[in-house]
Image (cartoon, rainbow, N blue to C red):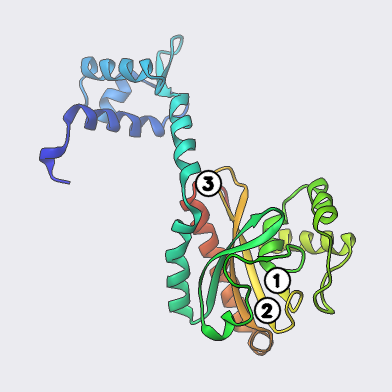
Amino acid sequence: MAPNYIVPAVDRTVKVLQSLVHHPSGISLAKLAVETEIPKSSLFRILMTLRHHSLVTVDSERETFCLGIKLVEWGSATLERLDVKAVVHPYLVRLAAQTGQSFYLALLNDAEVLLVDRADTPDIWQIVTRLGLRSPVHCTASGLSMIAELPDQEINELIEAKGLARFTPKTITTEKALKKKLAEVRRLGYAVADGDFKPDLYALAVGIRDYQGKIVASLMTALHSASARKSKKLVASLIKILQDEGYDISKRLGYRGDM
């Protein structure tokens, strides 16, 4: 941005806030003045103004300053407004172009998988549920990845509400088998559905987390089952891509944990 549009007082204020980010336990006025290169008198007025708006708090005993709770409120409001689909769509397009494979974004809605976006190859699209249509959670890679961390009580409620319908000979249809599968998903960090929902579909998925660490969506890729069986190297590479890209998307949504 052109320097003519920069307001010096606001620029200084932002510099102060950026500096305070690195001092969660607080920093003295003298040290902050050195760090920001702002004269103490001007810096003190900035800090008092920020304190007035709950953007900065003061520890009177230690005579230190740190960020205030108001910033948490603003940050949470911003993160909650993030459109997952808008964030993920460029990833889908790039991944499909780079790999020649299909990639999808799914959400958990009313205890079912809702496919909301895609970038894919025509042959795979013929056997994947169309956008807007719903799929069961217990036998799809996206569904398994999104419910893997739910408490047992919520899993039980989901089973009671939706059942465990059989779609193929490989479909999980018992509570015990489902919970064993979910434990495997948690251990591996990704979900696999090989002919569980549709006989010819091999799907891989990872959960996408929000700023609270909660899984809010799923990044999924799909192959013909025959192709997956022929190339373990391809499957391994897609798992790595899903995990890396899923983590990067989660960070874009505010997640700050480890993979």
Picture disc at residue 192:
1
**Rendering quarter of residue 220:** bottom right
Q: Amino acid at mark 3?
A: Arg
Which residue is most to the front?
Answer: 133
Looking at the rendered image, the quarter that the C terminus falls into is bottom right
Residue 29 x %, y %: 32, 18
Looking at the picture, tell me which residue is in the foreground, 157 or 57: 157
Disc 1 residue type?
Val
- Secondary element under disc 3, as helix, strand or loop, is loop
Q: At numbered mark 2, what does the secondary structure look like: helix, strand or loop? A: strand
Above-or-below relation of 212 to 43: below
Q: Could you say where residue 206 lies in the image, as x and y percent from the top left?
A: 62, 63
Which of pointers 1 and 3 lies earlier in the amino acid sequence?
Answer: 1
> Which residue position is annotated with label 2?
202
Residue 22 drawn at (x, y percent): 40, 34
Tell me: 50 left or right of 214. Answer: left
Counting residues from the start of the chain, the first of labels 3 and 2 encountered is 2
Q: CA distance from mark 1 to mark 2?
A: 7 Å
